[in-house]
Image: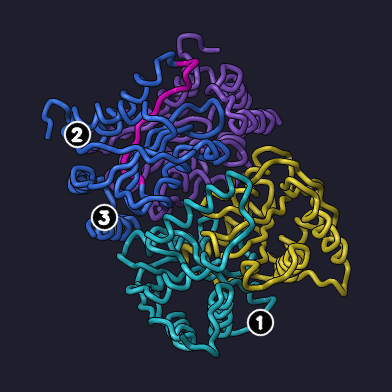
Chain colours: A cyan, B yellow, C purple, D blue
Amino acid sequence: MAFEKMIHDAFEESRNNSRLGDTTDEINEIKEYIKNAKKIYVPNKNGIKVKVLNEVLNKYGLPEAEILQINTSTADTSRIPALAKAYMALDQSDADLIIARGRLGIPGSGSLLIFIDNKGRILTCGTSPSHPIHKKSLEQAVYEEACEALEKIGFDKRLKK
Amino acid sequence: MAFEKMIHDAFEESRNNSRLGDTTDEINEIKEYIKNAKKIYVPNKNGIKVKVLNEVLNKYGLPEAEILQINTSTADTSRIPALAKAYMALDQSDADLIIARGRLGIPGSGSLLIFIDNKGRILTCGTSPSHPIHKKSLEQAVYEEACEALEKIGFDKRLKK
Amino acid sequence: MAFEKMIHDAFEESRNNSRLGDTTDEINEIKEYIKNAKKIYVPNKNGIKVKVLNEVLNKYGLPEAEILQINTSTADTSRIPALAKAYMALDQSDADLIIARGRLGIPGSGSLLIFIDNKGRILTCGTSPSHPIHKKSLEQAVYEEACEALEKIGFDKRLKK
Amino acid sequence: MAFEKMIHDAFEESRNNSRLGDTTDEINEIKEYIKNAKKIYVPNKNGIKVKVLNEVLNKYGLPEAEILQINTSTADTSRIPALAKAYMALDQSDADLIIARGRLGIPGSGSLLIFIDNKGRILTCGTSPSHPIHKKSLEQAVYEEACEALEKIGFDKRLKK
């Protein structure tokens, strides 16, 4: 119940106006959660994203993800399609970590790759501009977003665990 | 009613499985919306973020933002504090563009700076790791997030309109 | 900008712990908004719900709604399908009032009929149990939910404006 | 993992346009979940609501709830304050069932009492108009909302389990 206590404490700090920003302990809790995840799912129709994500997870010494084959195209009608995909995976599986990628907001807003925990809480993210702006391959974009998400919370591929 | 038609069309493409990703036209609609915004608000208690944001908006030839003085500290109890702040501004003002910055997700997840329109739709964003990771000043972090958000949708400071 | 001020004031009261609950003035603002709505849309594939809703709106002396023909079946993958339908209509039209009906939560949780304004804020609602519990026709269920939603904010069919 | 499979199956039916509405099996799953809940929390500052809720739960032969003492007043700045309170409890505890009560939407929209599961999914709800409309005591309003929520999914106080 580590996150529950951490969220409770941060909330009390905010209420008392004594919150000074995220702490190293909080970041470490997120890292521990990801390192210890037993069921990591990536909601997707095909396996391309999962292949790239596993390449990245491996580089950082993290456990592998599995594909969760659900049709996520309906998520595009949501306000935050990437988050809608993550919640679809959360609601239809027993994952303790979900990595989902989709549009950030309205068409043209680019893409968002997010990590959520077993209650749907956001742990980290990576983003890319739309394809007409970055002109990268899907594989390259997913690769960079995943690295961004992991480095943002202090993972370092040179230190592979 | 440009976004309404654009969202409707993109949605139909998704339903028919003919959607190929964001288009240049969609990105241009977002740019036009931001260029033509009349009331740009930044929900905040003090003026630091607004000063930095206006520096950035100016560099890209965009109209200035104003501070919307509301206490947004309660947003920290939300799942996506940055978005909660943006919605607080949306619900309490007549803004047509809101730029809000706050935590991305749980404590430790870093920060998110988002642009939303007059209906609460996400147009673009920039993100930073938590302070213990990036070690930048608040000003520097806000500056870089705002540049990221604008360049993500094709604004270019060398071309200043 | 009536709601904006009202929301701002209520929020300040909550922060100061001086909020005593909803006021008659607030309820009247909601009634005025609904009475003066110019574009009332009901997202739906077919016209049955709209016919029943207009019967109800008419009984309370309120303006008529129009159907907004969009496929809302993808909303069923959302956490609150009724709200997802309402937002789909908000994002794809210039409505100033949207009346949407869909599932409340997970399968089995029954139905929710909600009224949202031009920014997506919830004004009122009516609910029904699932069909296996209430055994009413769709028409009857929609009729009763709409009456519940309107009477909840003080409309009275005997006083027809 | 009963809800996960149920949600997955209902979602597939929706996608294939073969969904005919909620089923008795789905309603029974919700009832079983509530009957078997081990940690039922009610986020609240004081104990009044919990006392009334336990009176109701007892009448229907259901396990008792406990108070989760967190300050939920910040939830009033959310779009759906009742749901925001429920999520605050979810994020700060190890509850498997949360019963939260708060405002439905904007000030004046009345109140909503919701039951959510350990992932934040809505199971059932009860609603009341604002106090100036119904003029009931807080205790009476909470009592009736809780009965509505339970009877909506087929609980019957005459059959006490």
The answer to which of B70 and B7 lies nearer the viewer is B70
Chain under disc 1: A
Residue at numbered disc 3: D3
Q: Which amino acid type is shown beneath numbered disc 2?
A: Phe
Q: Which residues are magenta?
A: D122-133
Do the residues under discs 3 and 1 have CB atoms within 8 angstroms?
A: no
Chain under disc 2: D
Q: Nearer the viewer, mark 3 or mark 1?
A: 3
- Quick one: label 2, few (<14), some, or many (20+) residues within 10 Å? many
Q: Is residue A112 magenta?
A: no
Q: Which amino acid type is shown beneath numbered disc 1?
A: Lys
Residue at numbered disc 1: A135
Q: Residue at x 41, y 43 (%)?
A: D86
> Residue B8: x and y, percent?
57, 55
Label at residue D155: 2
Vertical relation: B54 (above or below) A47: above
Q: Which amino acid type is shown beneath numbered disc 3?
A: Phe
> Residue A69: x and y, percent?
34, 72
- Quick one: label 1, few (<14), some, or many (20+) residues within 10 Å? few
Q: Earlier in the sequence, mark 3 or mark 2?
A: 3
Left or right: residue C90 versus residue A58 is right
- Quick one: label 3, few (<14), some, or many (20+) residues within 10 Å? some
Question: To which quarter of the image does residue A40 belong?
Answer: bottom left
